Amino acid sequence: MATSSDRTDTIPLPDNETIIPGTIPADNIIIRPATASDIIYAEEIAAEMEASARARGTGISRRSPESIRTKILQGKAVIAITAAGIWAGFSYIEVWENGAFVSNSGLIVSPAFREKGIAANIKQQVFNLSRAMYPSAKIFSITTGSAVMKLNTRLGFEPVVYDDITHDPAFWAGCQSCVNYGTLCSKGFKNCFCTALLFTPKIA
Ligand SMILES: CC(C)(COP(=O)(O)OP(=O)(O)OC[C@H]1O[C@@H](n2cnc3c(N)ncnc32)[C@H](O)[C@@H]1OP(=O)(O)O)[C@@H](O)C(=O)NCCC(=O)NCCS
């Protein structure tokens, strides 16, 4: 049985800390940066993102299996899987304005594995990965979900206005598949139902 202490693959962080891939012992769920062999889960992840968005009746912008495969192959994703190889959770990093901003996006936990702390562990690791890959970037998320607001707040994010996060049109184009896109447009991309949360790194 794998445990967190079995694992030695760590990623250096700017402040000399390391990412230690996590394990949720009760279900033997391993949470770690995704690797090429994880692209087999892309279809299932995309389908669950869409199903969960429909169930909530709110907006999560749609991601294709292809875009998820790309994130995995770029080393910009964190995945949770059981020791038996069942997919349990996922999130990824996107980069905007030549690295001035990084978003932590697409957080999804498979319904069978919710409320076990998987999202909390994934969020921590995706944050660590963002800090390791882009130490001077501002990191942001936008969300309507209270779980994500709570988790980001614990990581040092603060609520901000949309003007404080990226103005990159490619980021906002990702909202086109959200049910609330009309509202976003009518507000001139300055406001919508999502709360924007921002982590600002200390300048060395
Ligand atoms: C939201 C989601 C990612 C939470 O995943 P999870 O693994 O069940 O979350 P965790 O067990 O790590 O819980 C983290 C914290 O959030 C809280 N939480 C979890 N789900 C919640 C919900 N639906 N509403 C309010 N709080 C919630 C937990 O109580 C916990 O708080 P605590 O640390 O104070 O006890 C999961 O329900 C999901 O995938 N939902 C559909 C997709 C989605 O909404 N993604 C977010 C888009 S921004």
Image: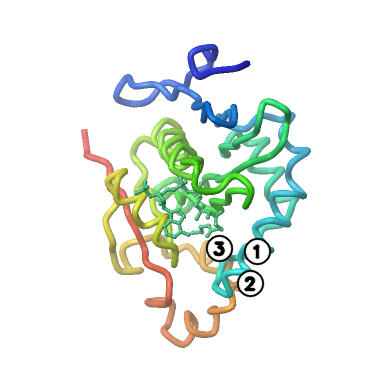
Q: Which residue is mark 1?
A: 62
Q: Are marks 2 and 3 in contact (CB under 8 Å)?
A: no
Foreground of the two, 34 or 99: 34
Q: Are marks 2 and 1 in contact (CB under 8 Å)?
A: yes
Report the amino acid beneath label 3.
Answer: Ala
Disc 2 is placed on an element classified as: helix
- Taking 127 as reference, is 57 left or right? right
Depth check, mark 1 against mark 3: the one in front is 1
Report the amino acid beneath label 2.
Answer: Ser
Cα gap from disc 2 to disc 3, whole angstroms? 13 Å
Report the amino acid beneath label 1.
Answer: Arg
Quadrant into which the N terminus falls: top right
Of label 2 and label 3, which has the lower sequence position?
Answer: 3
Q: Quadrant of residue 81?
A: top right
- Taking 136 as reference, is 93 left or right? right
**Residue 196 placed where, x, y %?**
36, 63
Q: Which residue is mark 3?
A: 170
Cα gap from disc 1 to disc 3, whole angstroms? 14 Å
Mark linked to residue 51? none
Neighbour tally class for label 1: few under 14, some 14-19, many 20 plus, Cα within 10 Å: some
Mark linked to residue 177? 2
